[in-house]
Image (spheres, helix red, strand yellow):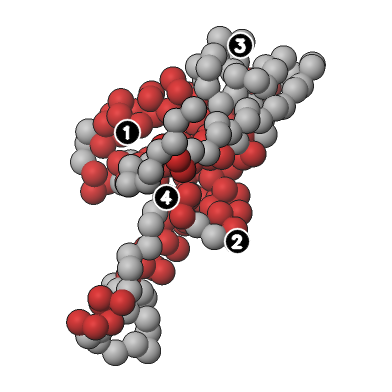
């Protein structure tokens, strides 16, 4: 029998299914963070330009009249056109699946519902997007050591409380994976124009 010397490499530890699952989850979270940071970098590049001046590469200095004509673009997804909205939602999916749900999404029950078709709920998309924007800002090193904690307290927890409340946007969606059901809640009626001030009101 050969006695191993001190120069022999140590035996490799056995990789269990649990260990492999942990590695896969870690890699998925890293990929989600990378995708989200790439989305931030693209947005910043579009906003500030390649040289950081806020001007396109071949543009000259802006005049006062140019600045007056240009309105700043809104960060909320509610203001995006159709193509930009589709791209933004797709960019959010890895973060939703591997960070929002995998890390912070507790067991899904009737009291804490979730909808796998969340992208069809307009109010959920808006809330998730706003929380995603805050995550990008407050997990950046420039946000300081308290940034992630502030994000969890001020953005994540209110989001989950609203989305997963029994009267939230997913209230009509079944949580049992064996019996999936998806239903969009009807929007409330539009404002009655006769109720607006400055108009002559008629009474029955």
For marks 1 and 2 on the same chain, the one whose residue lies earlier in the sequence = 2
Quadrant of the drawing holding the N terminus: top right
Residue 151, compared with residue 132, is above or below; it is above
Nearer to us of marks 4 and 3 is 4
Q: Mark 4: give few (<14), some (14-19) or many (20+) Cα within 10 Å.
A: few
Give the distance between the C-alpha atoms of the residues marked 1 and 2, in whole angstroms: 28 Å
Viewed as shown, does residue 175 lie left or right of 96?
right
Count up the numbered dots: 4
Residue 128, compared with residue 176, is above or below; it is below
Q: In the current view of this chain or complex, which residue is farthest to the right? A: 178
* Residues marked 4 and 1 touching at CB (< 8 Å): no
Question: x, y (%) of residue 185?
Answer: 63, 28
In percent of the image, x 52 and y 22: which residue is there?
168
For marks 1 and 3 on the same chain, the one whose residue lies earlier in the sequence = 3
Q: Which residue is mark 3?
A: 109
Q: Mark 1: give few (<14), some (14-19) or many (20+) Cα within 10 Å.
A: some
For marks 4 and 2 on the same chain, the one whose residue lies earlier in the sequence = 4
For marks 4 and 1 on the same chain, the one whose residue lies earlier in the sequence = 4
* Secondary element at tag 3: loop
Give the distance between the C-alpha atoms of the residues marked 4 and 1, in whole angstroms: 17 Å
For marks 4 and 3 on the same chain, the one whose residue lies earlier in the sequence = 4
Q: Which residue is mark 1?
A: 151
Q: Which residue is mark 4?
A: 76
In percent of the image, x 46 and y 55: which residue is there?
79
Give the distance between the C-alpha atoms of the residues marked 4 and 3, in whole angstroms: 30 Å
């Amino acid at each position: 029998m050969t006695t191993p010397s001190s120069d022999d490499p140590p035996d490799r530890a056995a990789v269990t299914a649990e260990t492999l699952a942990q590695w896969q989850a870690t890699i998925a979270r890293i990929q989600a963070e990378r995708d989200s940071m790439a989305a931030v970098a693209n947005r910043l590049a579009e906003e500030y330009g390649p040289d950081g001046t806020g001007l396109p590469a071949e543009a000259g200095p802006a005049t006062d009249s140019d600045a007056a004509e240009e309105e700043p673009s809104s960060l909320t997804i509610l203001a995006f056109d159709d193509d930009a909205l589709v791209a933004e939602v797709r960019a959010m999916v890895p973060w939703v699946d591997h960070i929002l749900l995998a890390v912070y999404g507790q067991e899904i029950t009737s009291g804490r519902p979730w909808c796998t078709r969340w992208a069809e709920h307009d109010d959920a998309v808006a809330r998730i997007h706003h929380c995603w924007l805050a995550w990008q800002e407050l997990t950046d090193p420039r946000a300081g050591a308290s940034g992630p904690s502030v994000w969890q307290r001020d953005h994540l927890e209110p989001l989950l409380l609203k989305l997963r409340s029994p009267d939230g946007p997913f209230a009509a969606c079944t949580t049992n994976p064996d019996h999936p059901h998806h239903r969009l809640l009807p929007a409330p009626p539009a404002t009655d124009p006769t109720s607006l001030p400055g108009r002559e009101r008629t009474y029955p």
